[in-house]
Image (spheres, rainbow, N blue to C red):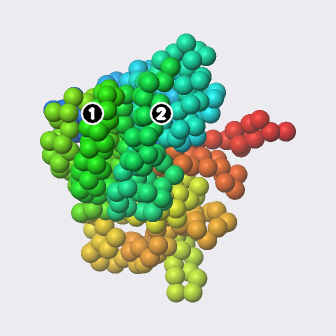
Amino acid sequence: MDYFEYRAGRLFAENVAVADIVRQVGSPVFIYSARTLREHYDKIAHAFAALDPLICYSVKSCSNVEILRLLAGLGAGFDVVSGGELFRVLKAGGQADRSFYAGVGKTDEEIRYALSEGLFMFNVESEAEFENIDRLAGELGKKPRCALRVNPDVDPKTHRHTATGKRESKFGVDLRRAEEFFARYGHAKAAKLVGVHLHIGSPVYTPAPYVEAITKTLELINRLRAAGYKIDTLDIGGGFAAWYEAGQTVMMDDYAEAIIPLVKDQKLKIVLEPGRYVSCNAGVLVGQVQYVKTGGDRTFVILDTGMHHLIRPPLYDAFHFVWPVAPGDDLSPVDRVKEPTLKGLQKCDVVGPICESSDFLAKDRPLPPVARGDLLAIFSAGAYGMAMASNYNSQPRPAEVLVDHDSFRVIRTRETYEDLMRGEG
Ligand SMILES: Cc1ncc(COP(=O)(O)O)c(C=O)c1O
């Protein structure tokens, strides 16, 4: 699953004690495990090998350039959603022609940048966007490959904020409109409409929604092919679930087993866009207890980190396992579950320093006794953690550290007050 484990009552990232990292780097800090990143990527490559897919790691989930470099070294392509993400990928040595540009609001400047770098494909979300890409490509003398993002109206059974393939979502066009789209733009001058893209949401905890969405989309592709359009690529998106809480996820092999038979003989290049599956459990966020306070019937554990560094709990009601970095042998957890069965635990709210009631990382969570100065680890924070972090309340963002076997290095230094003021005044 990952390489964060308790040994003799202390949390280790691979072979490095987390407390040793904090001693040298300070708190709060995101700590990533290189071995976990590699293994998760390899699991996808292995499970889907029969399709020889293009695996485009979803940069938005965790975009540190060193992590992109590690994944580029494994052969990953990249799913980017902005000029900034493309810039990071290129800095990391990623290949533009193995990268896919998605997103509903591409600006002219971003489109020109992507055109000049020669991406594998653009996904297109609307008629107006296609016309714009076609126009800009014509001006630059480019012939970009494009995939139409379709919205197959499938319920991914996930949080409403991350369901993206239902009829009412802002993404893509519905299947009926997709045929009109090809009729209108299938023979455009510059931009070549040769693919179909879908991403139904994330995390998707069972293979069934993928099967439903892909089946509907293949029917569309068949109709389009019968009408004379050449479709060579199907991007089935990301959303492959990560293990936030024991028992909630499926294995990559289960997704592959359900998906491969559907697409294997369809003469399509298959693109996958995994994000959290690769990065989520490859990272923990570590914070230090500033104060323990009681109020009403609650105990608040107040950290030097919070929603500004990991916004998923208030934004998506997301569960992240939280536990001390050095609880001792008797209180080391076996499973990362909401209700551990260890003795001597006390229910607490784990909160941050931000002036918002929504600034919490865990609510009503049984924890071992903790005191000022203790370190707590927030698990499964590798995806949509630092990538969504902000400077709200003028809080500097944490350092990022990459552990590899017995050693670690800082891959992003902690922000300073000077960093906060850059460009102002
Ligand atoms: C188009 C697209 N592809 C891929 C992803 C990655 O999702 P996940 O990190 O759940 O795999 C997202 C997430 O929002 C997305 O919008």
Amino acid under disc 1: Ala
Residue 336, compared with residue 152, is above or below; it is below
Can you tell which quarter of the image residue 355 is in? Answer: bottom right
Q: Residues within 10 Å of mark 2 (few under 14, many from 20)?
A: few
Which residue corresponds to the image point at 47% horizontal and 33% vertical from the top-left?
184
Which residue corresponds to the image point at 59% horizontal and 30% vertical from the top-left?
132
- CB under 8 Å between callouts 2 and 1? no
Which residue corresponds to the image point at 44% horizontal and 24% vertical from the top-left?
187
First in sequence: mark 2 or mark 1?
Answer: 2
Position of residue 206 measured from the top left corner of the image (x, y, whole percent): 25, 57
Position of residue 240 measured from the top left corner of the image (x, y, whole percent): 31, 49
Amino acid under disc 2: Arg
In-image side of 215 versus 122 (left or right):
left
Q: Residues within 10 Å of mark 1 (few under 14, many from 20)?
A: few
Is residue 78 or residue 115 the one in the foreground? 115
Residue 71 in sight in this render: no
- As drawn, which residue projects farthest toward the bottom? 296
Q: Which residue is mark 1?
A: 226
Q: Which residue is mark 2?
A: 184
Is residue 385 or residue 226 the one in the foreground? 226
Residue 280, compared with residue 322, is above or below; it is above
Can you tell which quarter of the image residue 364 is in? Answer: bottom left
Disc 1 element: helix
Disc 2 element: helix
Residue 264 in sight in this render: yes
Q: CA distance from mark 2 to mark 1?
A: 16 Å
Is residue 373 or residue 98 the one in the foreground? 98
Residue 52, compared with residue 308, is above or below; it is above
